[in-house]
Image (spheres, rainbow, N blue to C red):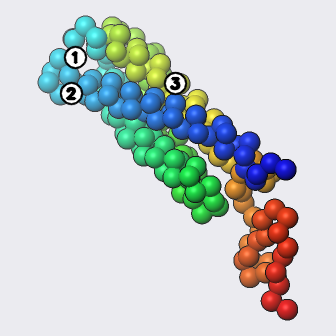
Amino acid sequence: MMAVGRDSKDLIGPLLAVNLVFFLIVLGLAGWSVDKYINGEQNHPHLGGNPATIFMLIYALISGVIGASSMLVGFVHLRAWRNDSLASASAMAIISWAFTALAFGFECKQILLGGHRGERLKTLEALIIISLLSQFLYVVVLHAGFFRSRYGPGYHKYGSDSAGDIPVGNEPHMSST
Protein backbone atom coordinates (compact mmCIF):
# COMPACT_ATOMS: atom_id res chain seq x y z
CA MET A 1 0.00 0.00 0.00
CA MET A 2 1.25 3.47 -0.88
CA ALA A 3 1.96 6.00 1.88
CA VAL A 4 -0.67 8.65 2.51
CA GLY A 5 -0.12 11.64 0.26
CA ARG A 6 2.68 10.16 -1.79
CA ASP A 7 1.10 11.11 -5.15
CA SER A 8 0.88 14.78 -4.30
CA LYS A 9 4.19 14.86 -2.46
CA ASP A 10 6.02 13.64 -5.57
CA LEU A 11 4.63 16.60 -7.53
CA ILE A 12 5.11 19.31 -4.94
CA GLY A 13 8.89 18.95 -4.53
CA PRO A 14 9.87 19.74 -8.13
CA LEU A 15 7.11 22.34 -8.38
CA LEU A 16 8.48 24.13 -5.31
CA ALA A 17 11.99 24.15 -6.75
CA VAL A 18 10.86 25.49 -10.14
CA ASN A 19 8.64 28.14 -8.56
CA LEU A 20 11.42 29.26 -6.23
CA VAL A 21 13.77 29.73 -9.18
CA PHE A 22 11.08 31.66 -11.10
CA PHE A 23 10.34 33.94 -8.15
CA LEU A 24 14.04 34.62 -7.53
CA ILE A 25 14.53 35.56 -11.19
CA VAL A 26 11.42 37.80 -11.01
CA LEU A 27 12.94 39.41 -7.91
CA GLY A 28 16.23 40.04 -9.68
CA LEU A 29 14.69 41.46 -12.87
CA ALA A 30 12.11 43.58 -11.04
CA GLY A 31 14.75 44.88 -8.61
CA TRP A 32 17.09 45.83 -11.46
CA SER A 33 14.26 47.54 -13.33
CA VAL A 34 13.07 49.49 -10.29
CA ASP A 35 16.65 50.60 -9.68
CA LYS A 36 16.86 51.91 -13.26
CA TYR A 37 13.53 53.71 -12.85
CA ILE A 38 14.66 55.33 -9.59
CA ASN A 39 17.86 56.48 -11.30
CA GLY A 40 15.80 58.03 -14.10
CA GLU A 41 17.01 55.61 -16.76
CA GLN A 42 13.61 54.71 -18.23
CA ASN A 43 15.08 54.89 -21.74
CA HIS A 44 17.61 52.15 -21.01
CA PRO A 45 17.64 49.80 -24.05
CA HIS A 46 16.71 46.78 -21.91
CA LEU A 47 13.94 48.57 -20.02
CA GLY A 48 11.62 51.09 -21.69
CA GLY A 49 7.97 51.02 -20.72
CA ASN A 50 5.05 53.36 -20.17
CA PRO A 51 3.11 54.83 -17.20
CA ALA A 52 1.90 51.36 -16.11
CA THR A 53 5.42 49.91 -16.00
CA ILE A 54 6.37 51.19 -12.56
CA PHE A 55 3.21 49.71 -11.01
CA MET A 56 3.89 46.38 -12.68
CA LEU A 57 7.47 46.47 -11.41
CA ILE A 58 6.47 47.25 -7.84
CA TYR A 59 3.89 44.45 -7.76
CA ALA A 60 6.33 42.08 -9.45
CA LEU A 61 8.85 42.90 -6.72
CA ILE A 62 6.27 42.30 -3.99
CA SER A 63 5.02 39.08 -5.60
CA GLY A 64 8.62 37.89 -5.94
CA VAL A 65 9.29 38.40 -2.23
CA ILE A 66 6.02 36.83 -1.12
CA GLY A 67 6.39 34.03 -3.68
CA ALA A 68 9.90 33.12 -2.56
CA SER A 69 8.73 33.19 1.07
CA SER A 70 5.79 30.99 0.12
CA MET A 71 8.14 28.48 -1.47
CA LEU A 72 10.26 28.36 1.69
CA VAL A 73 7.14 27.67 3.77
CA GLY A 74 6.22 25.05 1.15
CA PHE A 75 9.57 23.31 1.65
CA VAL A 76 8.88 23.19 5.40
CA HIS A 77 5.48 21.66 4.67
CA LEU A 78 7.07 19.15 2.29
CA ARG A 79 9.42 18.10 5.08
CA ALA A 80 6.72 17.90 7.78
CA TRP A 81 3.80 16.81 5.54
CA ARG A 82 1.15 17.35 8.20
CA ASN A 83 -2.20 19.10 8.40
CA ASP A 84 -0.86 21.96 10.50
CA SER A 85 1.94 22.70 8.06
CA LEU A 86 -0.56 22.47 5.21
CA ALA A 87 -2.50 25.39 6.69
CA SER A 88 0.45 27.77 6.63
CA ALA A 89 1.71 26.56 3.24
CA SER A 90 -1.70 26.93 1.60
CA ALA A 91 -2.32 30.37 3.12
CA MET A 92 1.04 31.65 1.89
CA ALA A 93 0.51 30.06 -1.53
CA ILE A 94 -2.88 31.74 -1.99
CA ILE A 95 -1.53 35.14 -0.89
CA SER A 96 1.44 34.72 -3.22
CA TRP A 97 -0.84 33.78 -6.11
CA ALA A 98 -3.03 36.83 -5.43
CA PHE A 99 -0.08 39.24 -5.55
CA THR A 100 1.23 37.56 -8.68
CA ALA A 101 -2.23 37.99 -10.22
CA LEU A 102 -2.07 41.71 -9.36
CA ALA A 103 1.32 42.00 -11.06
CA PHE A 104 -0.15 40.13 -14.04
CA GLY A 105 -3.00 42.64 -14.22
CA PHE A 106 -0.61 45.57 -14.34
CA GLU A 107 1.47 43.69 -16.88
CA CYS A 108 -1.58 43.32 -19.13
CA LYS A 109 -2.27 47.05 -18.81
CA GLN A 110 1.35 47.83 -19.62
CA ILE A 111 1.22 45.67 -22.75
CA LEU A 112 -2.08 47.26 -23.84
CA LEU A 113 -0.67 50.77 -23.46
CA GLY A 114 2.15 49.83 -25.82
CA GLY A 115 5.41 51.67 -26.32
CA HIS A 116 8.97 50.42 -26.28
CA ARG A 117 9.51 47.45 -24.00
CA GLY A 118 13.08 46.24 -23.62
CA GLU A 119 14.22 42.64 -23.54
CA ARG A 120 14.47 42.42 -19.73
CA LEU A 121 10.99 43.86 -19.38
CA LYS A 122 9.62 41.30 -21.85
CA THR A 123 11.43 38.56 -19.97
CA LEU A 124 9.94 39.78 -16.70
CA GLU A 125 6.48 39.78 -18.28
CA ALA A 126 6.92 36.19 -19.46
CA LEU A 127 8.15 35.08 -16.05
CA ILE A 128 5.18 36.70 -14.32
CA ILE A 129 2.82 34.76 -16.59
CA ILE A 130 4.69 31.50 -15.96
CA SER A 131 4.81 32.22 -12.20
CA LEU A 132 1.08 32.92 -12.12
CA LEU A 133 0.27 29.62 -13.80
CA SER A 134 2.78 27.51 -11.88
CA GLN A 135 1.74 29.07 -8.56
CA PHE A 136 -1.89 28.24 -9.38
CA LEU A 137 -0.85 24.66 -10.12
CA TYR A 138 0.98 24.58 -6.77
CA VAL A 139 -2.16 25.78 -4.95
CA VAL A 140 -4.25 23.10 -6.68
CA VAL A 141 -1.78 20.31 -5.89
CA LEU A 142 -1.48 21.52 -2.31
CA HIS A 143 -5.24 21.27 -1.85
CA ALA A 144 -5.53 17.86 -3.53
CA GLY A 145 -5.88 16.24 -0.08
CA PHE A 146 -9.28 17.89 0.15
CA PHE A 147 -10.62 15.37 -2.36
CA ARG A 148 -8.83 12.19 -1.33
CA SER A 149 -6.45 11.45 1.53
CA ARG A 150 -4.10 9.57 -0.81
CA TYR A 151 -3.11 12.95 -2.28
CA GLY A 152 -1.83 14.36 0.98
CA PRO A 153 -2.86 15.91 4.24
CA GLY A 154 -6.32 17.31 3.89
CA TYR A 155 -9.23 18.76 5.69
CA HIS A 156 -10.92 16.54 8.20
CA LYS A 157 -14.00 16.75 10.33
CA TYR A 158 -12.88 17.89 13.76
CA GLY A 159 -14.91 17.93 16.94
CA SER A 160 -16.39 14.44 16.57
CA ASP A 161 -16.74 11.96 19.39
CA SER A 162 -12.97 11.47 19.57
CA ALA A 163 -12.19 14.93 20.99
CA GLY A 164 -10.36 15.97 17.84
CA ASP A 165 -8.20 12.87 17.41
CA ILE A 166 -8.42 11.51 13.89
CA PRO A 167 -7.15 8.05 13.07
CA VAL A 168 -4.70 7.94 10.15
CA GLY A 169 -4.65 5.04 7.70
CA ASN A 170 -5.48 1.63 9.16
CA GLU A 171 -4.66 2.51 12.75
CA PRO A 172 -7.40 1.50 15.18
CA HIS A 173 -9.46 4.31 16.62
CA MET A 174 -8.82 4.62 20.35
CA SER A 175 -11.82 5.77 22.32
CA SER A 176 -11.94 6.96 25.88
CA THR A 177 -14.44 4.29 26.94
Is residue 5 visible in this depiction of the protein?
A: yes
Res 57 quadrant in image: top left
- Residues tagged 1 and 2 counted as in contact (Cβ below 8 A): no
Residue 107, x across and y down, in percent: 44, 24
Question: What residue is disc 1 on?
Answer: 42
Q: Is residue 84 above or below residue 28?
A: below
Query: Residue 106's x, y, as percent?
Result: 43, 28
Q: Is residue 29 left or right of residue 173?
A: left
The reply to whether dot 1 and dot 3 touch (C-beta < 8 Å) is: no
Give the mark, 3 or 2, whose residue is nearer the N terminus. 2
Neighbourhood count class around disc 1 (C-alpha, 10 Å): few under 14, some 14–19, many 20 upward: some
Q: CA distance from mark 3 to mark 2?
A: 22 Å
Specify the label residue 35 is tagged with.
2
At horizontal 39% and vertical 28% (from top left) the residue drawn is 26
Q: Amino acid at mark 2?
A: Asp
Which is more toward the observer, 130 or 149? 149
Amino acid beneath label 1:
Gln
Mark 1 or 3: the one toward you: 3
Would residue 124 appear left or right of 134 to someone viewing this image? Answer: left
Q: Nearer the viewer, residue 33 or 149?
A: 149
Residue highlighted by disc 3: 129
Residue reaching furthest left?
39
Instruction: Report the residue at 46% width, 23% height from top.
Output: 127
Please name the residue shown 80% across and 48% down the image.
Answer: 2
